[in-house]
Image: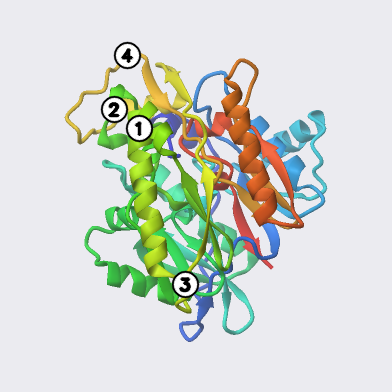
Amino acid sequence: MRIAFAFLGLFLAACTKAPEAPVRKADAREAYSFPAEFEPHASIWVAWPTYENKAGHPTEPVLEDILRALHGHVSVDLLAQDEAEAGMIRERLARDAVPSDHVRIHAVPHADIWLRDMGPIFVKTSGGGRAVVDYAFNAWGYPGFDRSSRTGLIEDAVDRKVAALRGLPVVRSSLSSEGGNRESNGAGTLMLTEQVERQRNPGLSREQIEAEFRRTLGATHFVWLPQGIAEDDATWEGPLPGGIYTPLTPGGHIDEYARFADAHTILLGEVTEAEAQEDPIRAMTRERLEKARAAIEAAGDQDGRPFRIVRVPMPEPLYDTLRPGDGVYASMKGMRYTSGVPFPKGKPVRIIVSTSYLNFLVTNGVVLAQVYFKEGRPPRVKEKDDAALRILGEVFPGRRVVPIDAEAVNLGGGGVHCITQQEPL
């Protein structure tokens, strides 16, 4: 899910640098609340891709499919590097017959497409307005990241620039945290992966992290899940069993395996015991998901009531190969690995693609859901696709479930939810 820093260096140097807009500070007397994603939206924010995760697998078509699916339901605000790229995007959307009357394009430099994480976090204020929370960005905790580098400064400024575009005040926070690791039920409960938040903020206790989320998001109750799925383990930790690498994944984001469907219902990924016996990586994921289930049951909601837990199958494992010249490979080869296993520079590496049915986007009238069946793949893949789509349709009544082939994005460690960010009404 994470930026190919070295790969993008020359690209970003050539981009027109937009001036940093003056930050309008939020009123310290205001209180904030973080709406659930299933509540009404004013807009969905996305960013135009900057590179290919794997050569020959462009991510632009995925974004175009998202724009098509959102047409007629919600406005879209799209970030371009500059006005020249904005013009190119308009021409391409027209060429590809992508409806664009709901799309507004803004010139905001960005190094990557993961607006869920470094993009604007919109909150409502006690005075009836809105604000943007600006968390510190540390590149998903990857070693060697220089926050003061050109790339770091560009990524860190995206949310403040969006706030300036909207004329919204900014709530500053020194906490390092990403939107992909926070799930709100809209009633005060925040669900997070503890391993992720603690790794990003090693000097803070869980109580200190909670205090900052109480201040910035209005959270009153926390559901801490111990660890994310194995397929989402941080790449710098080294290969998984079988020498399989993860493709710049963030280390356990909540939006890969546990999501709120409503204030009382949590969708939780599931690996069966039989599936765990087929693959050691799936066995690791099953163990973690069952610990997550126990944590959800123990925590309950903000009113002390148990959550309804709906299990959703995890997709069939999808493996691929990355080679020199691929965007993700460029970052992987220069990474500092903590496992002691040297990266085989110059040689192909096998990866497990970042697939999940829970990395969906829910917005006005529609749910955008990832699917994986293609001709030549086992029927079991389609069976799981169909099961996941059916479950999403049941828990989101009144919304149309739109299947999206996001594999080109999954190759970079994220998915549909990771590249979108909602702005509440």
Q: Which residue is mark 4?
A: 346
Give the mark nearest the N terminus, 2 or 3: 2
Give the residue at x 48% y 26%. Answer: 318
User: Dividing the picture into quarters, in which one does residue 61 lie?
Assistant: top right
Three-letter amino acid code at the position of disc 2: Pro
Q: Which residue is mark 1?
A: 281
- Figure check: 222 above or below 159: below
Q: Which residue was labeled with disc 2?
A: 241
On screen, residue 243 versus residue 407, left or right, reads: left
Nearer-N-terminus badge (3/4): 3
Does 262 sit left or right of 144 as displayed? right
Taking the spot 28% from the left edge, 57% from the top edge, the residue there is 198
Q: CA distance from mark 1 to mark 2?
A: 7 Å
3D distance between C-alphas at marks 3 and 4 = 50 Å
Q: Residue 377: where, in percent of width, then height? A: 58, 19
The foreground one among 124 and 181 is 181
- Distance from label 2 to label 3 (Cα)? 36 Å
Label 1 neighbourhood size at 10 Å, few (<14), some (14-19), many (20+)? some
Dot 3 alpha-carbon crowd within 10 angstroms: few under 14, some 14 to 19, many 20 or more = many
Q: Tag 3: residue type?
A: Asp
Could you tell me how far apart the alpha carbons at marks 4 and 2 are, in whole angstroms? 21 Å
Mark toward the start of the polypeptide (4 vs 2)? 2
| Mark with earlier residue (1, 4) | 1
Q: Nearer the viewer, residue 361 or 284?
A: 284
Q: Is residue 79 above or below residue 205?
A: above
Q: Which numbered disc covers residue 301? A: 3
Query: Residue drawn 37% across and 40% down?
Result: 285
Q: Which quadrant: the C terminus?
A: bottom right
Displayed quadrant of residue 284: top left
Counting residues from the N terminus, which is met first, the one under dot 1 or under dot 2? 2
